[in-house]
Image (spheres, helix red, strand yellow):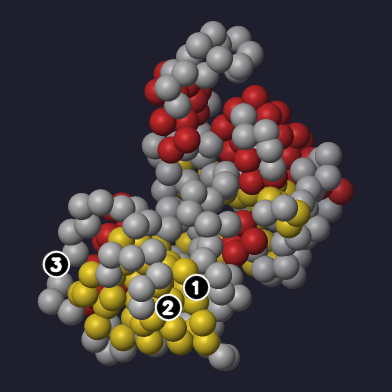
Amino acid sequence: MYDCIIIGTGAAGISAALTLKARGKNFLLLGSPQLSAKINAAEKISNYPGLCAVSGEHLKEAFSSQLEAEGIEITSAQVTGVYDMGGHIGVLCGQQVYEAKSVILATGVEAVKPVVGELEFLGRGVSYCATCDGMLYKGKKIAVVCTSKSMEEEAEYLASLAAEVYFVPLYKDAELKSGNVHYIKDMPQAIEGNMRAERLVFRKTTLDVDGIFMLKSSMAPSALVPGLRSEGGHVAVDRQMRTNIDGVFAAGDCTGRPYQYAKAVGEGNIAAHTVCDFLAERK
């Protein structure tokens, strides 16, 4: 049982990890070892205190070096659910479940917004995890909306199970080659159905399917955490980074604007200190 699980390896997650390390807590840092794609893509950062006109690449190298120096390891995993287990938190990553006394959401903001009906049908015909739910659709007809080439391995796995796969890549140079894969080059507009998702609606056509997989490199926190309160598309927090769910905290871009590294680092630090207070109160 960890004291805390940090979800996200951007500026907020790294800041939280460094603070928890300094406070001697037992924690898990989940995310990409390449850190935040936002950091990597930054050409020049001019408003980060102490660093004048630093590139995103150099900031990433500085973050990575500091994590290494502090002995903080990143566990490469995509989180597909965060659940209140009655006194502690369960974090689902594929078929692996990690347990902790608290969680810090530092997931950033979702690059691809949910389509109409996506969140409403989540768990009822819509899934974000091929490993978790793929076997439910063995021999069936599914749609797979993929936002990144890095997710193609999951799409290939689904193609090995399903009878037919309608593959919707939202990027260039997709390379799925299975014989049961049909490419659709159109933008999804909505997911429709009754008790379960039954149709994926495009600008030019509508597709009847048994299930829909939305393969994304990141998920909206509201999709990850059932019952999480949001405001204006962001996680609602107080000044101590507490959410409406006991033991769940949030920091960084996912809590709202401004989307800046300095703000994310400060919130990550606050969230970690609040976690320490939370743990002390429950001893």
Q: Residue at x 67, y 68 (%)?
A: 226
Task: Choose top left, top right, bottom left or bottom right for residue 139.
Answer: bottom left
Residue under the point 53% across and 62% down? 114
Q: Nearer the viewer, residue 84 or 113?
A: 113
Q: Could you say which is closer to the camera, residue 268 or residue 55?
A: 55
Answer with left or right where residue 19 lies relative to residue 177: right
Q: Let me know if residue 155 appears in the view.
A: no
Image position of 198 (left or right of 171): right
Q: Secondary structure at mark 2?
A: strand
In this picture, residue 203 sits left or right of residue 218: left
Q: Is residue 179 positioned above or below 147 on the image? A: below
Label 2, on which residue? Answer: 200
Residue 262, position in %: x, y? Answer: 65, 25
Identify which residue, 121 or 269, lies in the foreground. Answer: 121
* Label 3 element class: loop
The residue carrying mark 1 is: 190
Crowding around mark 1 (Cα neighbors within 10 Å: few <14, some 14 to 19, many 20+) is some
Horizontal side of residue 256 vs 261, given as left or right: right
Do the residues under discs 2 and 1 have CB atoms within 8 angstroms? Answer: yes
Q: In which quadrant is the N terminus drawn?
A: bottom right
Q: Callout 2, which amino acid?
A: Leu
Q: Nearer the viewer, mark 3 or mark 2?
A: 2
Residue 177 - label: 3
